[in-house]
């Protein structure tokens, strides 16, 4: 059996999150990347969220493989996400997963905050190192992000199982930058029930075999 359908994933983020622009702006030192998408009269900041989510998911899959009885399935990370761009001598291989941010009616606004740079050696505030940075916030205390995972090629039972383990492992991890300031903390992960029902028995089987 294989899985060849899209997978809907919803992340509930506590507080604010930040996915940076990488260069100084006019009104704030460190702005966020934004693509203004009109959706029901509200503006949604996509801010390269799909790539940030994909990176967080890959790290979660790798962590779950290395810290559980899934160590023999390490090659599945590469089949799902492809080779790392830093692997110069490796044969380039595209992963099977494509991530898309789904539109949302939830209003997301940006606000500016002030930060200071801390000296790594002395732990004190460095002189003339005051800066401003932009963050994204939802309408309330939480931000909900919804993604769609598309399988470019069918997932094997084991790939689906490892992917589910990685999705489950995202809880209390973070997406985006400034995690040290408590930003982007993922409090809840909701996975498409049909995919969960498909992958969970295979994950249980792998764990029992590895044990």
Image (tube, rainbow, N blue to C red):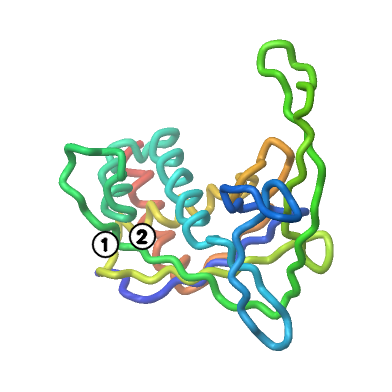
Element carrying mark 2: helix
Q: Which mark is residue 167?
A: none
Position of residue 76 in the picture relative to residue 19 (left or right):
left
Compare residues 136 and 196 and report the one nearer the observer.
136
Residue located at (75% from left, 29% from top):
129
The image shows residue 99 at horizontal and vertical percentages of: 44, 66
The image shows residue 133 at horizontal and vertical percentages of: 73, 47
Quarter of image, res 2: bottom left
- How dense is the environment of label 1, judged by Cα within 10 Å: few (below 14), some, or many (20 and up)? some
- How dense is the environment of label 2, judged by Cα within 10 Å: few (below 14), some, or many (20 and up)? many
* Contact, mark 2 vs mark 1 (Cβ under 8 Å): yes
Q: In this view, does 50 lie above or below 40?
A: above
Question: Where does label 1 land, which residue?
Answer: 156
Position of residue 118 in the picture relative to residue 67 (left or right):
right
Residue located at (71% from left, 55% from top):
26
Element carrying mark 1: strand
Question: Where does label 2 land, which residue?
Answer: 160
The image shows residue 24 at horizontal and vertical percentages of: 64, 48
- Quarter in which the C terminus is drawn: top left
């Amino acid at each position: 059996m294989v899985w060849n359908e899209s997978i809907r994933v919803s992340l509930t983020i506590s507080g604010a999150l930040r996915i940076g622009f990488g260069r100084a702006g006019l009104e704030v030192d460190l702005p966020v990347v934004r693509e203004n998408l009109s959706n029901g009269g509200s503006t949604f900041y996509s801010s390269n969220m799909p790539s940030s989510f994909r990176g967080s998911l890959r790290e979660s899959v790798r962590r779950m493989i290395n810290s559980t009885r899934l160590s023999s399935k390490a090659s599945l990370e590469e089949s799902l996400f492809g080779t790392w761009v830093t692997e110069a001598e490796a044969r380039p291989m595209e992963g099977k997963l494509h991530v898309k941010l789904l539109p949302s009616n939830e209003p997301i606004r940006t606000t500016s905050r002030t930060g200071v740079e801390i000296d790594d050696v002395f732990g004190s505030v460095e002189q003339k190192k005051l800066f401003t940075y932009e963050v994204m916030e939802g309408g309330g205390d939480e931000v909900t992000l919804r993604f769609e995972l598309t399988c470019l090629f069918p997932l094997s039972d084991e790939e689906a199982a490892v992917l589910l383990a990685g999705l489950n492992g995202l809880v209390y991890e973070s997406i985006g930058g400034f995690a040290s300031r408590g930003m982007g903390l993922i409090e809840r992960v909701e996975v498409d029930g049909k995919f969960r029902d498909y992958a969970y028995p295979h994950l249980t089987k792998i764990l029992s075999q590895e044990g």
